Image: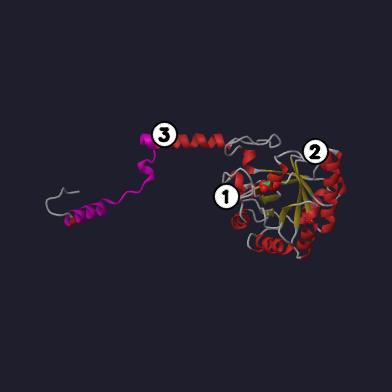
Amino acid sequence: MTTRAKTTISTLRERKRGQRKITMLTCYDYATARLMEEAQIDSLLVGDTYAEVCLGHATTLPASLEHLVTLADAVRRGAPSAYLVGDMPFLTYQVCPEEAIRNAGLYMARGGCDCVKVEVDRRLARTVEAMATAAIPVMAHLGLKPQSIQSLGGYKTQGKHAAQAQQIIEDARIMESAGAVALLLEAVPQDVAAIISRATELPVIGIASGPECDGQVLVFHDMVGYGGGHPPRSAKQYAHIGEQLIEAFRAYADEVRRGVFPTTEMSVRMSAAELEALQQSLRAAAPSGSRPP
Ligand code: KIV
């Protein structure tokens, strides 16, 4: 396995200054984390999209903190040098700053995260400030906020009109002043993403927000074609592992049905002496009159 220096927030800031793009993928398990570490992906996000892509829910709302912290801990073991971001699930930070700090602390202490991500706008600036004061690095997720899907009424680009775009740009400034260490922009027009990325010193990660962000994130299942459903237009597919897996499952089922798998070479045999001893003891134990084994 390739080893590399630990990626920290300073690494991400240097990337921005040096105009070298930051790579981020969602990750939910140890095995995949090992592969992403090998591929030197800079940052892994234990996203609440877990509820959708792994648990089959229609939204991210059912993701639980306990569950995601356990996943973060596994991902950390698989990718010791990645910048690990834990996604704070619905209602784990919105209620009050104290709860946000306590819940984020679980991600940092038990999940091994470098940072937590919260879906925010200016109304949660006090919470971000309180978290930053408690030494919790916060990535502020702006634009389309999937945890607000029921209020938004659908997964739509945010900030297509000047007034709303200006709000998002101002929210980004407010989050920087509140002490956020990075921004994530989801589904904002690329013009808006470019303005925000140029105006802030914070690393800006984009999803469905165009090429001018400082880095990009994709949902693992979408980018490798794993699982059903249609990935969003913005999610390029770099592999089609779902199709390869179906082929593998079919080949396995076919071989089991035809008795081709497993072969005797793959199985263990008893020595002739042990087999004879076994047969003798089975015969001795058999009730009289029954068929010998
Ligand atoms: O939960 C998640 O996977 C996310 C990405 C869509 C950025 O927030």
Q: Nearer the N terminus, badge 1 or badge 2?
A: 1
State how far apart marks 1 and 2 are (Cα).
Answer: 35 Å
Q: Secondary structure at mark 3?
A: helix
Query: Looking at the picture, which amino acid does disc 1 mark?
Result: Ala
Q: Which mark is residue 286?
A: none
Question: Which residue is at a point 75% across and 65% down the rendered structure image?
Answer: 134
Q: Relative to residue 127, is residue 24 depicted above or below? A: above
Is residue 123 visible in the rendered image? The answer is yes
Q: Relative to residue 98, is residue 278 depicted above or below? A: above
Mark 1 vs mark 2: give the one in front: 2
Query: Looking at the picture, which amino acid does disc 3 mark?
Result: Asp
Packing grade of label 2 (10 A; few <14, some 14-19, many >=20) is some
Query: Looking at the picture, which amino acid does disc 2 mark?
Result: Pro
Packing grade of label 3 (10 A; few <14, some 14-19, many >=20) is few
Q: Which mark is residue 31?
A: 1
Residue highlighted by disc 2: 189
Q: Is residue 120 magenta?
A: no
Question: Which residue is at a point 81% across and 54% down the rendered structure image?
Answer: 175
- Residue 290 picture location, percent across and down: 15, 50
Quarter of the view holding residue 66: bottom right
Residue highlighted by disc 3: 254
- Seen in the image, is 239 located left or right of residue 211? left
Residue bounds of the magenta highlight: 256-284
Q: Secondary structure at mark 2?
A: loop
